[in-house]
């Protein structure tokens, strides 16, 4: 089952409630990672082709998932070394696509900070979890994508992260200014609020 961009928009709103909280623990198993924040919130981010996406889970659910996991993904260790103790600063949907960006800030002495970002590409079998720095350089990724695998972009540590190609079409705001049944299918991803009667 494919998720539409509308679900990613909803996820961004749900997770944004937790901005300002600090990362206390990170775990990983098979094709997922969890991020535990202060106050008891636990995020699960998954890139498995059958269960990709994001969710808020309980600590007990996390323990159950860890108990049946066979391996720890490499990206989990990169998340630990870069994000433990950092503050969640924002959660946004990118380009109205199935791309969710979690931004963090880790403060060091003398007021210096290191922004880090997690990109969840929730795209069926192409789903991926990517950790980047403030210059969009890939630190680590759940799945390494080589040029032979994807002619548009490779996703490898040390390389610049390139977003998936943007959708083309009407923005939701433009469609709402002049709603019409004839061009509703041309609206790019986002949340769609249908008027009571299209003109």
Image (cartoon, helix red, strand yellow):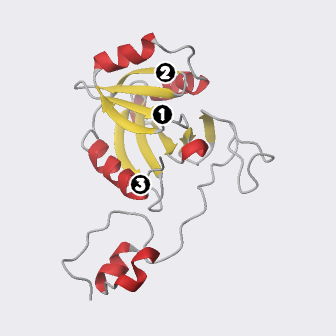
Report how far apart the C-alphas of labels 2 and 3 lie in the structure: 23 Å
Q: Residue at x 56, y 26 (%)?
A: 78
**Label whose residue precedes the other's in the sequence (2 or 3):** 2
Tally of numbered tags:
3
Q: Would you name the residue on which mark 3 appears?
A: 93
Residue at the limit of the structure toward the top, as seen here: 67
**Label whose residue precedes the other's in the sequence (3 or 1):** 1
- Mark 1, residues whose alpha carbon is within 10 Å: few (<14), some, or many (≥20)? many
Report how far apart the C-alphas of labels 2 and 1 lie in the structure: 10 Å
Q: Residue 72, relative to residue 121: is it above or below?
A: above
75 vs 86, nearest the viewer:
75
Element under label 2?
Answer: strand
Q: Residue at x 37, y 57 (%)?
A: 6
Across and down, in percent, residue 107 comes to 40, 32
83 vs 30, nearest the viewer:
30
Q: Is residue 99 left or right of residue 180?
A: right
Q: Would you name the residue on which mark 1 appears?
A: 46
Q: Residue at x 35, y 80 (%)?
A: 175
Q: Is residue 127 left or right of residue 190?
A: right
Report how far apart the C-alphas of labels 3 and 1 lie in the structure: 16 Å
Whether pointer 3 and pointer 1 mark residues with C-beta atoms closer than 8 Å, the reply is no
Q: In the picture, which quadrant includes the C terminus?
A: bottom left
Q: Would you name the residue on which mark 2 appears?
A: 28
**Label whose residue precedes the other's in the sequence (2 or 1):** 2
């Amino acid at each position: 089952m494919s998720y539409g961009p509308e679900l990613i928009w909803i996820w961004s709103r749900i997770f944004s409630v937790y901005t300002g909280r600090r990362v206390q623990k990170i775990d990983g198993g098979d094709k997922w990672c969890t991020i535990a924040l202060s106050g008891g919130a636990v995020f699960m981010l998954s890139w498995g082709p059958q269960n990709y996406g994001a969710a808020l889970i309980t600590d007990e659910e996390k323990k159950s998932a860890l108990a049946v996991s066979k391996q720890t993904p490499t990206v989990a260790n990169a998340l630990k070394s870069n994000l433990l103790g950092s503050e969640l600063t924002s959660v946004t949907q990118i380009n109205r696509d199935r791309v969710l960006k979690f931004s963090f800030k880790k403060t060091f002495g003398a007021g210096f900070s290191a922004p880090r970002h997690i990109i969840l590409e929730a795209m069926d079998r192409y789903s991926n979890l990517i950790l980047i720095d403030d210059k969009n350089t890939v630190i680590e990724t759940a799945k390494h994508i080589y040029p032979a695998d994807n002619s548009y972009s490779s996703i490898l540590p040390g390389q610049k992260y390139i977003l998936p190609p943007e959708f083309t079409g009407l923005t939701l705001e433009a469609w709402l200014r002049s709603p019409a049944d004839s061009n509703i299918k041309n609206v790019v991803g986002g949340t769609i609020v249908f008027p009571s009667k299209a003109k």
